[in-house]
């Protein structure tokens, strides 16, 4: 009863993200009372396994005792302070840690308060760098087909998911879009590495033709998450780094979704042995507690802005909540867990269990592909397994899976026809088994 009362009050005044609100005439909202570990509880005592880490942000469970304690202590000292002219310990310590743990060469940290804002910062910094270095012709960005970088207008412009982008096209800057390395489209028998390498040729040609006008290339390393958890081989990033150096173009790695252990390494770029010129982080950065993002960059880029004020080369970008002390403290507690617990090794065990549990889906008549990178498993549903003909979007096949799974106490949130699992790292093997079982039933019964 409490559920429906809250739901009514909500629907009278609220407008939810990424939602056709009309759907809630038939699809109930679920008011959550509390969370603990991988479980969420509503007001009627129903439990839901958070198999998607609450939109990919939660790493170590809800109400994590370590993060809770760190936040409570911070709260009694400093909640927030203006971050221009002033600073504080949590922001300094976090920047020191991020510089230490991110790929070599990233030595400066700029804070913002969400992922899209971090992408805007990286785009503006790259463009502005070339202005400051007297290369004003460099004013375009290259992006990959099917990529996603956020919803604000600059971030949306460098993304390529039509569902989110198409309506706003007249408002968006022009970008150069390269074919994706997405290995879903490889030939029968072709390896991920071979396909990704083959696809790289397109990007290389675009660089040859346009490098004089290009500031940067922005990519989601290894997994295009919002684009349907589409995956590619690390060789692509290695080739990309070499080409960016050769053609004098920045590389922006958007690890907002894949950073912090999601792909098996702390950062996805490590699997290619590369360092980007800009690294965007958010989502898991605070363990899923508070909005915070960071853009890491190099000395070389920082130096291009550093001069006498009268030269007007400064990066005059700010957000009110830049460097929020509580958010920085949550991030420090999260990194502390990586330091003191064997998170990446433990994730290898979990990922192996996920691999085993996902195998049965391979033979399902409506599954075209089961793919995995570290702690992300995706199952591509199709109408026709042989031709890979997709379910028409109007059928909303994923929504049926969502509803079924909820009725069984599992929060899955398919992206179109792609069911995926991206659980918090504190999940047990029994909970993993439940998650895969419910997904199986959802597409079989
Ligand atoms: C979620 C996401 C963003 C946007 O982050 P928000 O905090 O939602 O603005 C950008 N890039 C990638 C790769 C993401 O997954």
Image (cartoon, grey):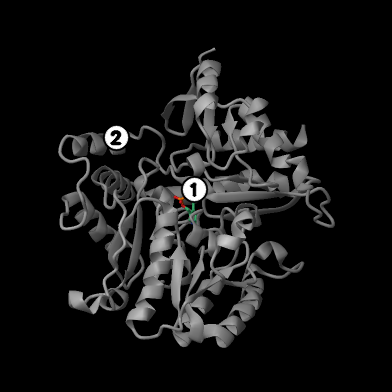
Left or right of residue 386: residue 59: left
Label tally: 2
User: Where is mark 2, residue-wise?
Assistant: 68
Quick one: quadrant of the C terminus?
Answer: top right
SS at mark 2 in the image:
helix
Observer-nearest of 403 and 193: 403
Task: Examine the rendered structure and indicate whether residue 375 appears above or below residue 118.
Answer: above
Question: How far is the residue under mark 2 from the one under mark 1?
Answer: 26 Å
Dots 2 and 1: beta carbons under 8 Å?
A: no
The residue positioned 35% from the left and 49% from the top of the image is: 292
Task: Examine the rendered structure and indicate whether residue 341 appears above or below residue 179.
Answer: above
Task: Give the image location of residue 99, x and y in percent.
Answer: 28, 64
Left or right of residue 100: residue 254: right
Residue 91 - label: none
First-in-chain label (2 vs 1): 2
SS at mark 1 in the image:
helix
Task: Give the image location of residue 387, x and y in percent.
Answer: 84, 57
Q: To which quarter of the image does residue 84 belong?
A: bottom left
Observer-nearest of 440 and 78: 78
User: Where is mark 1, residue-wise?
Assistant: 349
Task: Give the image location of residue 428, x and y in percent.
Answer: 49, 36
Quick one: quadrant of the N terminus?
Answer: top right
Residue 159 seen in the current view? no
């Amino acid at each position: 009863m409490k559920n429906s009362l809250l739901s009514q009050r909500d629907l009278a005044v609220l407008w939810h993200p990424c939602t056709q609100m009309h759907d809630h005439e038939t699809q109930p909202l679920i008011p959550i009372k509390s969370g603990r570990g991988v479980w969420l509880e509503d007001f009627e005592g129903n439990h839901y396994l958070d198999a998607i880490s609450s939109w990919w942000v939660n790493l170590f469970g809800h109400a994590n005792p370590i993060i809770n304690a760190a936040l409570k202590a911070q709260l009694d000292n400093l909640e927030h302070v203006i971050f221009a002219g002033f600073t504080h310990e949590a922001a300094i310590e976090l920047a020191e840690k991020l510089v230490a743990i991110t790929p070599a060469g990233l030595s400066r940290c700029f804070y913002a308060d969400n992922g899209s804002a971090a992408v805007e910062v990286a785009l503006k910094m790259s463009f502005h760098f070339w202005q400051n270095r007297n290369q004003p012709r460099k004013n375009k960005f290259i992006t990959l087909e099917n990529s996603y970088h956020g919803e604000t207008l600059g971030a949306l412009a460098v993304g390529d998911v039509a569902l989110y982008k198409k309506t706003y096209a007249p408002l968006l800057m022009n970008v150069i879009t390269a074919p994706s390395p997405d290995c879903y489209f490889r030939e029968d028998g072709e390896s991920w590495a071979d396909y990704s390498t083959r696809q790289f040729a397109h990007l290389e040609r675009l660089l040859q033709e346009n490098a004089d006008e290009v500031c940067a290339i922005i990519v989601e390393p290894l997994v295009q998450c919002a684009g349907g958890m589409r995956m590619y081989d690390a060789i692509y990033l290695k080739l990309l780094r070499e080409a960016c150096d050769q053609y004098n173009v920045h590389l922006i790695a958007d690890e907002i979704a894949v950073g912090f252990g999601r792909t098996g390494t702390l950062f996805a770029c490590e699997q290619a042995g590369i360092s980007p010129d800009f690294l965007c982080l958010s989502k898991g950065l605070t363990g899923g507690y508070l909005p915070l993002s960071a853009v890491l960059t190099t000395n070389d880029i920082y130096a291009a802005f550093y001069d006498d004020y009268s030269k007007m080369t400064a990066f005059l970008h700010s957000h009110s909540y830049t460097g929020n002390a509580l958010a920085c403290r949550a991030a420090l507690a999260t990194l502390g867990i990586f330091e003191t617990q064997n998170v990446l090794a433990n994730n290898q065990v979990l990922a192996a269990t996920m691999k085993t549990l996902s195998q049965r889906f391979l033979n399902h008549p409506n599954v075209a592909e089961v793919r995995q990178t570290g702690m992300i498993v995706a199952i591509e549903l199709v109408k026709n397994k042989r031709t890979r003909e997709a379910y028409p979007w109007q059928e909303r096949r994923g929504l049926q899976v969502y509803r079924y799974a909820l009725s069984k106490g599992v929060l899955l949130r398919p992206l179109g026809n792609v069911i995926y699992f991206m659980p918090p790292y504190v999940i047990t093997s029994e909970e993993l088994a439940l998650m895969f079982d419910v997904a199986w039933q959802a597409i079989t019964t």
